[in-house]
Amino acid sequence: MQKLFEGHRLTPTQRRIAHCMVRRAADAPFLSSVELAELAGVSQPSVTRFAVALGFDGYPALRRHLREVAPAEPPGGNGAANEYQQAVQAEIDNLRHLAAALADPSPVVRAGRLFAASRPLPVLGLRAATAQAAGFVYFARKVHPDVRLLDEGGTLLADRIDAAVRAGASTLLCFALPRHPREVVEALEYARAAGLTVVTVADSAFAPVARHTDLLLPAPVGTGLAFDTVCAPMLLGRVLLEAMCDALPDAQSRLEEFDAKAAARGLFVE
Protein backbone atom coordinates (compact mmCIF):
# COMPACT_ATOMS: atom_id res chain seq x y z
CA MET A 1 0.00 0.00 0.00
CA GLN A 2 2.83 2.36 0.84
CA LYS A 3 4.29 1.88 -2.64
CA LEU A 4 0.93 2.96 -4.08
CA PHE A 5 1.32 6.37 -2.43
CA GLU A 6 5.00 6.91 -3.16
CA GLY A 7 5.89 9.12 -6.10
CA HIS A 8 2.77 11.27 -5.78
CA ARG A 9 2.85 14.86 -4.63
CA LEU A 10 0.28 14.77 -1.85
CA THR A 11 -1.07 17.67 0.15
CA PRO A 12 -0.78 17.59 3.96
CA THR A 13 -4.43 16.45 4.15
CA GLN A 14 -3.82 13.71 1.61
CA ARG A 15 -0.70 12.58 3.45
CA ARG A 16 -2.85 12.33 6.56
CA ILE A 17 -5.25 10.03 4.72
CA ALA A 18 -2.35 7.94 3.39
CA HIS A 19 -0.89 7.67 6.88
CA CYS A 20 -4.24 6.49 8.22
CA MET A 21 -4.59 3.88 5.49
CA VAL A 22 -1.09 2.52 6.09
CA ARG A 23 -1.81 2.22 9.81
CA ARG A 24 -5.13 0.49 9.11
CA ALA A 25 -3.86 -1.55 6.16
CA ALA A 26 -5.91 -4.64 7.01
CA ASP A 27 -9.15 -2.64 7.21
CA ALA A 28 -8.54 -0.09 4.44
CA PRO A 29 -9.87 -2.16 1.50
CA PHE A 30 -13.21 -2.50 3.27
CA LEU A 31 -13.73 1.04 4.58
CA SER A 32 -16.25 3.40 3.01
CA SER A 33 -15.10 6.90 2.13
CA VAL A 34 -17.08 8.24 5.07
CA GLU A 35 -15.47 5.76 7.48
CA LEU A 36 -12.00 6.56 6.19
CA ALA A 37 -12.69 10.28 6.47
CA GLU A 38 -13.74 9.87 10.10
CA LEU A 39 -10.66 7.78 10.96
CA ALA A 40 -8.32 10.27 9.29
CA GLY A 41 -10.11 13.31 10.67
CA VAL A 42 -10.78 14.84 7.25
CA SER A 43 -13.83 15.53 5.10
CA GLN A 44 -15.37 12.94 2.78
CA PRO A 45 -14.62 15.08 -0.33
CA SER A 46 -10.96 15.10 0.73
CA VAL A 47 -10.96 11.29 0.50
CA THR A 48 -12.37 11.50 -3.02
CA ARG A 49 -9.75 14.06 -4.08
CA PHE A 50 -7.08 11.83 -2.54
CA ALA A 51 -8.15 8.89 -4.71
CA VAL A 52 -8.15 11.09 -7.83
CA ALA A 53 -4.65 12.37 -6.94
CA LEU A 54 -3.48 8.75 -7.01
CA GLY A 55 -4.84 8.33 -10.55
CA PHE A 56 -8.17 6.63 -9.82
CA ASP A 57 -11.59 7.74 -11.04
CA GLY A 58 -12.75 8.01 -7.43
CA TYR A 59 -12.59 6.33 -4.06
CA PRO A 60 -14.59 3.22 -5.12
CA ALA A 61 -11.97 2.52 -7.80
CA LEU A 62 -9.18 2.90 -5.24
CA ARG A 63 -10.96 0.54 -2.85
CA ARG A 64 -11.46 -2.06 -5.61
CA HIS A 65 -7.76 -1.87 -6.40
CA LEU A 66 -6.86 -2.43 -2.74
CA ARG A 67 -9.17 -5.43 -2.54
CA GLU A 68 -7.53 -6.93 -5.62
CA VAL A 69 -4.00 -6.61 -4.25
CA ALA A 70 -4.70 -7.19 -0.53
CA PRO A 71 -4.37 -10.82 0.61
CA ALA A 72 -6.11 -10.11 3.91
CA GLU A 73 -9.68 -11.08 4.76
CA PRO A 74 -12.26 -8.56 5.89
CA PRO A 75 -12.14 -7.63 9.60
CA GLY A 76 -13.56 -10.44 11.68
CA GLY A 77 -12.97 -13.02 8.95
CA ASN A 78 -10.03 -14.70 10.61
CA GLY A 79 -11.83 -17.94 11.36
CA ALA A 80 -11.92 -18.91 15.02
CA ALA A 81 -8.99 -16.69 16.05
CA ASN A 82 -9.83 -14.44 19.00
CA GLU A 83 -8.88 -10.78 19.24
CA TYR A 84 -5.63 -11.54 21.07
CA GLN A 85 -4.51 -14.04 18.46
CA GLN A 86 -5.41 -11.58 15.73
CA ALA A 87 -3.27 -8.93 17.40
CA VAL A 88 -0.31 -11.32 17.52
CA GLN A 89 -0.84 -12.27 13.88
CA ALA A 90 -0.94 -8.60 12.93
CA GLU A 91 2.43 -8.08 14.63
CA ILE A 92 3.85 -11.07 12.75
CA ASP A 93 2.65 -9.45 9.53
CA ASN A 94 4.27 -6.17 10.57
CA LEU A 95 7.57 -7.97 11.10
CA ARG A 96 7.26 -9.54 7.65
CA HIS A 97 6.78 -6.06 6.17
CA LEU A 98 9.88 -4.87 8.02
CA ALA A 99 11.89 -7.85 6.77
CA ALA A 100 10.84 -7.05 3.20
CA ALA A 101 11.86 -3.41 3.63
CA LEU A 102 15.29 -4.47 4.90
CA ALA A 103 15.96 -6.28 1.62
CA ASP A 104 17.61 -2.97 0.74
CA PRO A 105 19.92 -2.40 3.71
CA SER A 106 21.42 0.86 2.41
CA PRO A 107 19.18 3.23 4.46
CA VAL A 108 20.03 1.37 7.68
CA VAL A 109 23.72 1.26 6.81
CA ARG A 110 23.66 5.00 6.14
CA ALA A 111 21.93 5.62 9.47
CA GLY A 112 24.50 3.51 11.32
CA ARG A 113 27.34 5.56 9.84
CA LEU A 114 25.62 8.81 10.77
CA PHE A 115 25.18 7.63 14.37
CA ALA A 116 28.78 6.48 14.64
CA ALA A 117 30.07 9.84 13.38
CA SER A 118 27.90 11.97 15.68
CA ARG A 119 29.62 12.84 18.98
CA PRO A 120 27.38 13.17 20.96
CA LEU A 121 24.38 11.30 19.55
CA PRO A 122 21.06 12.69 20.85
CA VAL A 123 18.14 10.24 20.79
CA LEU A 124 14.62 11.65 21.04
CA GLY A 125 11.51 9.78 22.13
CA LEU A 126 8.48 11.26 23.88
CA ARG A 127 5.33 9.71 25.32
CA ALA A 128 4.61 6.37 23.55
CA ALA A 129 8.09 6.37 21.98
CA THR A 130 9.98 6.90 25.23
CA ALA A 131 10.59 3.19 25.78
CA GLN A 132 11.97 2.72 22.27
CA ALA A 133 14.39 5.62 22.66
CA ALA A 134 15.49 4.52 26.14
CA GLY A 135 16.08 0.95 24.97
CA PHE A 136 18.23 2.15 22.09
CA VAL A 137 20.24 4.44 24.38
CA TYR A 138 20.81 1.73 26.99
CA PHE A 139 22.58 -0.51 24.50
CA ALA A 140 24.16 2.25 22.41
CA ARG A 141 26.04 3.55 25.44
CA LYS A 142 27.95 0.28 25.61
CA VAL A 143 29.69 1.03 22.30
CA HIS A 144 29.23 4.76 21.58
CA PRO A 145 31.21 7.25 23.69
CA ASP A 146 28.40 9.81 24.13
CA VAL A 147 24.69 9.06 23.69
CA ARG A 148 22.12 11.44 25.15
CA LEU A 149 18.49 10.53 25.81
CA LEU A 150 15.93 13.28 25.15
CA ASP A 151 12.79 11.92 26.77
CA GLU A 152 11.20 15.03 28.25
CA GLY A 153 9.32 17.66 26.29
CA GLY A 154 8.66 21.25 27.24
CA THR A 155 10.80 24.32 26.90
CA LEU A 156 14.01 22.55 27.97
CA LEU A 157 13.97 20.26 24.92
CA ALA A 158 15.32 22.96 22.61
CA ASP A 159 18.01 23.75 25.19
CA ARG A 160 19.13 20.14 25.22
CA ILE A 161 19.27 20.06 21.43
CA ASP A 162 21.37 23.24 21.48
CA ALA A 163 23.70 21.68 24.05
CA ALA A 164 24.19 18.62 21.88
CA VAL A 165 24.97 20.78 18.85
CA ARG A 166 27.50 22.84 20.84
CA ALA A 167 29.16 19.60 21.97
CA GLY A 168 29.60 18.52 18.34
CA ALA A 169 26.50 16.48 17.47
CA SER A 170 25.80 16.09 13.76
CA THR A 171 22.84 13.68 13.81
CA LEU A 172 19.70 13.19 15.90
CA LEU A 173 17.81 9.91 16.08
CA CYS A 174 14.09 10.13 16.77
CA PHE A 175 11.56 7.42 17.57
CA ALA A 176 8.14 8.77 16.61
CA LEU A 177 5.07 6.65 17.34
CA PRO A 178 1.36 7.44 17.39
CA ARG A 179 -0.22 9.43 18.69
CA HIS A 180 2.41 11.89 17.49
CA PRO A 181 3.02 14.69 20.02
CA ARG A 182 3.14 18.18 18.52
CA GLU A 183 6.34 18.90 20.46
CA VAL A 184 8.15 16.06 18.63
CA VAL A 185 7.34 17.63 15.26
CA GLU A 186 8.47 21.01 16.57
CA ALA A 187 11.66 19.52 18.04
CA LEU A 188 12.62 17.91 14.74
CA GLU A 189 12.01 21.16 12.91
CA TYR A 190 14.21 22.92 15.46
CA ALA A 191 16.93 20.27 15.23
CA ARG A 192 17.18 20.55 11.46
CA ALA A 193 17.31 24.35 11.68
CA ALA A 194 20.19 23.90 14.15
CA GLY A 195 22.09 21.90 11.53
CA LEU A 196 21.43 18.34 12.67
CA THR A 197 20.68 15.50 10.27
CA VAL A 198 17.47 13.89 11.51
CA VAL A 199 16.94 10.12 11.28
CA THR A 200 13.48 8.99 12.35
CA VAL A 201 11.92 5.60 13.06
CA ALA A 202 8.18 6.15 12.51
CA ASP A 203 5.11 4.02 11.98
CA SER A 204 4.84 4.99 8.31
CA ALA A 205 6.49 7.15 5.67
CA PHE A 206 3.45 9.43 5.87
CA ALA A 207 3.67 10.15 9.59
CA PRO A 208 3.47 13.84 10.59
CA VAL A 209 7.22 13.86 11.30
CA ALA A 210 8.12 12.90 7.72
CA ARG A 211 8.57 16.40 6.35
CA HIS A 212 11.00 17.26 9.14
CA THR A 213 13.15 14.15 8.64
CA ASP A 214 16.21 13.63 6.43
CA LEU A 215 16.11 9.83 6.60
CA LEU A 216 12.84 8.16 7.60
CA LEU A 217 12.77 4.45 8.40
CA PRO A 218 9.20 3.10 8.62
CA ALA A 219 8.19 0.27 10.93
CA PRO A 220 4.45 -0.43 11.21
CA VAL A 221 2.61 -0.66 14.52
CA GLY A 222 -0.31 -2.87 15.44
CA THR A 223 -3.65 -1.21 16.14
CA GLY A 224 -5.84 -4.18 17.05
CA LEU A 225 -5.69 -3.71 20.83
CA ALA A 226 -6.57 -0.78 23.07
CA PHE A 227 -2.93 0.34 22.93
CA ASP A 228 -0.67 0.07 19.88
CA THR A 229 1.80 -2.81 19.66
CA VAL A 230 5.29 -1.85 18.53
CA CYS A 231 7.38 -4.97 17.91
CA ALA A 232 8.57 -3.75 14.48
CA PRO A 233 9.87 -0.35 15.70
CA MET A 234 11.67 -2.07 18.58
CA LEU A 235 13.32 -4.58 16.25
CA LEU A 236 14.27 -1.84 13.80
CA GLY A 237 15.95 -0.05 16.69
CA ARG A 238 18.06 -3.15 17.34
CA VAL A 239 18.93 -3.37 13.65
CA LEU A 240 20.11 0.25 13.77
CA LEU A 241 22.26 -0.59 16.78
CA GLU A 242 23.87 -3.37 14.77
CA ALA A 243 24.53 -1.00 11.88
CA MET A 244 26.07 1.53 14.26
CA CYS A 245 28.32 -1.16 15.76
CA ASP A 246 29.46 -2.09 12.27
CA ALA A 247 30.44 1.55 11.69
CA LEU A 248 32.30 1.94 15.00
CA PRO A 249 35.81 0.46 14.72
CA ASP A 250 36.16 -0.03 18.47
CA ALA A 251 32.67 -1.39 19.15
CA GLN A 252 33.82 -4.95 19.76
CA SER A 253 36.60 -3.94 22.12
CA ARG A 254 34.19 -1.74 24.09
CA LEU A 255 31.77 -4.66 24.42
CA GLU A 256 34.55 -6.96 25.59
CA GLU A 257 35.70 -4.35 28.12
CA PHE A 258 32.16 -4.03 29.48
CA ASP A 259 31.78 -7.81 29.77
CA ALA A 260 35.08 -8.08 31.63
CA LYS A 261 34.09 -5.37 34.11
CA ALA A 262 30.62 -6.85 34.55
CA ALA A 263 32.13 -10.22 35.35
CA ALA A 264 34.58 -8.69 37.82
CA ARG A 265 31.75 -6.89 39.60
CA GLY A 266 29.43 -9.88 39.54
CA LEU A 267 26.93 -7.65 37.81
CA PHE A 268 24.75 -10.40 36.36
CA VAL A 269 23.41 -13.63 37.77
CA GLU A 270 24.53 -16.46 35.52
Image (cartoon, helix red, strand yellow):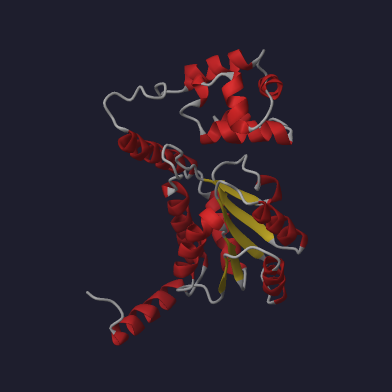
Q: Quadrant of residue 254?
A: bottom left
Q: Position of residue 61 (x, y in %)?
A: 60, 13
View extreme (left): residue: 270
* Residue visible at 59% across and 13% down in the picture: 60
In the image: residue 228, left or right of residue 188: left
Q: Position of residue 195 (x, y in %)?
A: 75, 63
**Quarter of the image with the N terminus in it:** top right
Residue 29 shows up from this direction: yes
Q: Quadrant of residue 266?
A: bottom left
In the image: residue 84, left or right of residue 3: left
Residue 203, relative to residue 28: is it above or below?
Answer: below
**Quarter of the image with the C terminus in it:** bottom left
* Residue visible at 60% across and 41% down in the picture: 205
Q: How many marks?
A: 0
Front one among 216 and 185: 185
Q: Position of residue 31 (x, y in %)?
A: 53, 21
View extreme (bottom): residue: 264
Front one among 263 and 162: 162
Q: Position of residue 161 (x, y in %)?
A: 68, 68
Residue 2 shows up from this direction: no
Residue 162, relative to residue 60: is it above or below?
Answer: below
Residue 98, relative to residue 241: is it above or below?
Answer: above
View extreme (right): residue: 193
Front one among 244 and 79: 79
Q: Quadrant of residue 261?
A: bottom left
